[in-house]
Image (cartoon, helix red, strand yellow):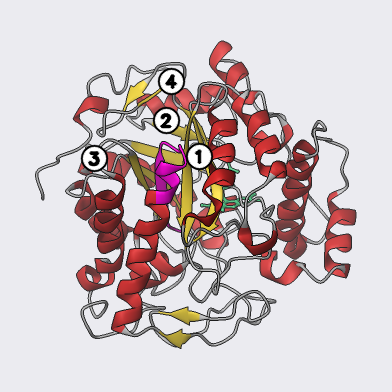
Amino acid sequence: MTEPSTGTVAAANRETATLGDPITLPCGHTLRNRIAKPSMAEAMGGRHGRPGERLTNLYTRWAGSGAGLLLTGNVMIDRRSLGEPGDVVIEDDRDLEALSAWAAAAKSGGASAIVQLNHPGRQTLASVSKEVVAPSAVRPRVKGARFPKPRELTGDEIEQIVQRFATAAEICVRAGFDGVQIHGAHGYLVSQFLSPLANLRTDQWGGDPERRRRFLIEVVRATRAAIGPDRILSVKLNSADFQRGGFSEQESIDAIRALEGESVDLLEISGGTYSSAAMVGASKAAAKDAGKASTRAREAYFMAFAERARKEVSMPLMITGGLRSAAAMNEALAAGIDLIGVARPLTLEPDLPKRLIADPTTASQLHRVRTGLSFLDGAAEIVWHNRQMRRMARGLDPDPQIDGKLGLVRTLLRGRVIPRRRRGG
Ligand SMILES: Cc1cc2nc3c(=O)[nH]c(=O)nc-3n(C[C@H](O)[C@H](O)[C@H](O)COP(=O)(O)O)c2cc1C
């Protein structure tokens, strides 16, 4: 195993930390507490993927949440390849001023803020992206949605995409963000490179686990070089893809060990893809695994895996997925996890982090969105959370009474549901 070059700062008070304690990341940046708002795609970019007033309003609201770290929804690095309509895109510094306003809004309450950078690869629709490219020409299999067959990337194109991550990252920190996160989870391009089902290459970018993770490592290296040593560089990674023959827990552990030597400040653990939506707790395979791993009813979807990762590396770890009560969050901290991601509850209860820190008996009041037709629940949930974000962007409070079924029908009628159907970002 590579001698860890990161994480020692965090390790000092690990296991006795509470939610309100600050943490200094290996790059030297201190987060004021242990609660993070993970990425949730806002779909609020303006024409040409420019961030605007709606995003600054929404992040001004979350700036008052009490969270220590705010991650933006995924931002694209190539306007030819979008995850969904309304994605923000950073290819060059033409929108520096707008990005600076977004950063300033997010940081206005004392939280740190980083941008999640993403390339969707094959997980996009022809109606959304001019170019559907992937490590190999393999179509994703997603029940109920027909994705186009992607074109296999050339070696030169792969190197250009690595550079695009770095360019976008440099612009983010120039705009005032505290760093970036590389989206390596949920079946998007980085995750496609990691997957033996999506990456059938036999060149330097595929063929065995080490070559399949090369893209991730190259993106991390180029990004670190672009942002300098003292900005936050985070990676979001799947514990597994939860598909037979897909990226496995062992491959994920090996990737995490490889990242330990690469000056990563924070590894966020999630799981799943559009085909098996474990990230939002909607994967049967993931549920089965969790059941096997522990007889205790656990809120945190990926806790068993995070505990395994904790034993392998010393870099700061963040866990996201299912956490709702301060009790479970403190339990995760006691198990050596450094940061707690709380996503969906923050669209309904934007002040939740403050309350979780102030009172260890606090728990989110969020309920899953149920339509009565379980195969529609995932889509209805995404639409519901997006509507709450849109309310806050308009200066309104979230509305717990929003009807999940109705929202989905409206979105279906507008023809927007397929790209979002099972997505958890
Ligand atoms: C509306 C919505 C959009 C999302 N967009 C993203 C995204 O852009 N990037 C990402 O990594 N995860 C995305 N996610 C997944 C969340 O970051 C998180 O992993 C998931 O919601 C589980 O955490 P929770 O149980 O605290 O909500 C999204 C989730 C939702 C509900």
Mark 1 vs mark 3, foreground winner is 3
State the residue position of label 4: 32
Magenta span includes 231: no
The answer to if 180 sits in the magenta stretch is yes
Q: Locate residue 102, reporting x and y percent.
A: 58, 39
The residue pinned by badge 2 equals 332
- Marks 4 and 1 close (CB-CB < 8 Å): no
Q: Which residue is mark 1?
A: 300
Is residue 13 visible to the viewer in this orientation of the structure?
A: yes
Q: Is residue 313 above or below residue 83?
A: above
Q: CA distance from mark 4 to mark 1?
A: 23 Å
User: For mark 3, what is the residue?
Assistant: 229
Q: Amino acid at mark 3?
A: Pro
Dot 4 or dot 1, earlier in sequence? 4
SS of the residue under disc 3: loop
The answer to which of marks 1 and 3 sits earlier in the sequence is 3
Q: Residues within 10 Å of mark 1 (few under 14, many from 20)?
A: many
Who is closer to the viewer here, 278 or 117? 117
